[in-house]
Amino acid sequence: MGKALIIGAGGVASVCIHKCCQNSDVFEDICIASRTKSKCDALKEKLDGGKTKISTAQVNADNVDELIALINSYKPDVVINLALPYQDLTIMDACLATKTNYVDTANYEPLDTAKFEYKWQWAYRERFEKAGITALLGSGFDPGVTGVFSAYAMKHQFDEINYIDILDCNAGDHGYPFATNFNPEINIREVSAKGSYIEDGKWVETEPMEIKRVYNFPEIGEKDMYLLHHEELESLALNIKGIKRIRFFMTFGQSYLTHLKCLENVGMTSIEPIDFEGHKIVPLQFLKAVLPDPASLGPRTKGKTNIGCIFIGKKDGKDKTYYLYNVCDHQECYKEVGSQAVSYTTGVPAMIGAAMILTGKWNKPGVHNIEEFDPDPFMDALNKFGLPWKESFNPELVD
Ligand code: NDP
């Protein structure tokens, strides 16, 4: 049915590429392009021989001209951006110049400020509309499936949704005292930032990890979770009618937090460049180089993830609560595609988002967040491609 150019060859890209090959009726031809071509070639070698035709290319996604040249030579129907958030705008520029659809899983972040907001990408709306191409923003799990869950709850369960709590629990144990489950630089920037949530249309800021709750997660049990700032709060507060408050919580174990505090205290999580033996280095980038590669955690990680949304609102004049979630098992993911569940839960929705565009189900010129589309075909695809969802009408609530 179509051709996809996948940019990036890391943990998330690897899962997405496996899933494109499982969905070969839609993904007839894919090109894997990244900074380090050997990683693309290794993925091709692993997956070649099926119905999906695979090619590889080297590209520096910070360079718009290189991206344009690659898109013009390969001529994809959609570009799936699975590099880092820093590359979002250069890749969107190249898509605009070549009139190619665009999908990503994380919003743009400037390298020098750890602050994620949609304003930079939303500024492309009119240009994408005029070019007649679709940009689908945030097609991972959170953001991503959490937005699809919200659109589904709104469509089928509520007349209005007043409160959303997004709960992200990773109960996986990789056996290391400290490691991150996805790109360490992005992960540490996210968790060491101030927390925030939206109440009555305004952002309320908290100190990092200031708000803690304990939640009894289905199929996992009790875990400590902390309120974080998260990008989908911004778009969901605009797109879901009737929202009074929306929060995001993520679980962290004590060992992770103690190590993080220590690394912060000694300055290792800073993104300010420092002089080191005549070079400028960014401490956080150096830390990334000494931490385990998230891709190497796959075989070691045991346990489950549970990510979902608790909705509180009204249906037919009555109060209603509803919980939609997915439980994913690290070892099962590893058996299937050779990656742990954090990459899996992001790579599967990235493939599904691109499939929605390739099959014409979600074509809407402009720049859109995922909850702006009809959730039903995406919800069906989640069940089909390894992320089945569950629902509860009487969930434990977060105070
Ligand atoms: P990895 O670090 O494993 O992979 C990133 C890949 O991008 C690497 O192959 C890297 O190349 C490549 N890359 C980086 N810079 C460039 C560049 N300038 N040009 C070309 N390629 C480049 O990250 P993950 O796979 O863990 O994460 C990928 C994305 O997914 C991130 O944006 C992350 O924020 C997002 N994410 C979203 C989630 C969600 O639920 N929405 C959850 C988890 C992640 P090289 O190998 O040379 O370093």
Image: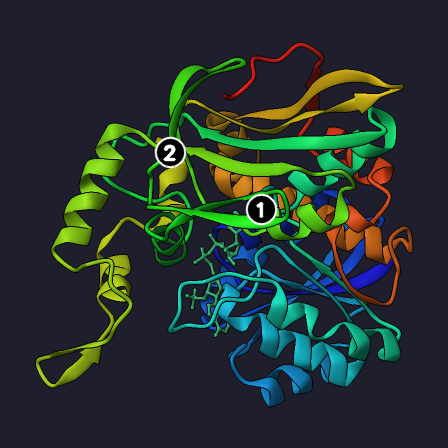
Answer left or right for 170 relative to 255.
Answer: right
Q: Quadrant of residue 302?
A: top left
Answer left or right for 396 relative to 367.
Answer: left
User: What separation in Å lies between label 2 and label 1 (alpha carbons)?
Assistant: 33 Å
Q: Quadrant of residue 275?
A: bottom left
- In the rendered structure, which amino acid carries the disc numbered 2? Ile
Q: Quadrant of residue 279?
A: bottom left
Identify whether 19 is placed above or below 6.
Answer: above
Q: Position of residue 164 (x, y in %)?
A: 63, 32
Instruction: Please tell me which residue is depicted at 47% across the width and 73% down the height of the picture.
Output: 35
Q: Which residue is mark 2?
A: 211
> Residue 15: which disc?
1
Q: Is residue 227 visible?
A: yes
Does the closest atom of ligand 1 sit within 8 Å of the Cβ of label 2? no
Mark 2 or mark 1: name the one nearer the start of the chain: 1
Identify whether 257 is placed above or below 60.
Answer: above
Q: Position of residue 263 (x, y in %)?
A: 17, 51
Instruction: Please tell me which residue is depicted at 81% across the width and 33% down the height of the picture.
Output: 154
Identify whether 122 is placed above or below 377.
Answer: below
- In the rendered structure, which amino acid carries the disc numbered 1? Val
Identify whether 31 is placed above or below 139.
Answer: below
Answer left or right for 367 relative to 285.
Answer: right
Instruction: Please tell me which residue is depicted at 62% across the width and 43% down the height of the picture.
Output: 200
**Closer to us: 372 or 95:** 372
Q: Is residue 20 visible?
A: no
Q: Position of residue 178 (x, y in %)?
A: 24, 40
Nearest to the eye among marks 2 and 1: give it.
2
Q: Position of residue 253 (x, y in %)?
A: 30, 29
**Dot 2: what SS?**
loop
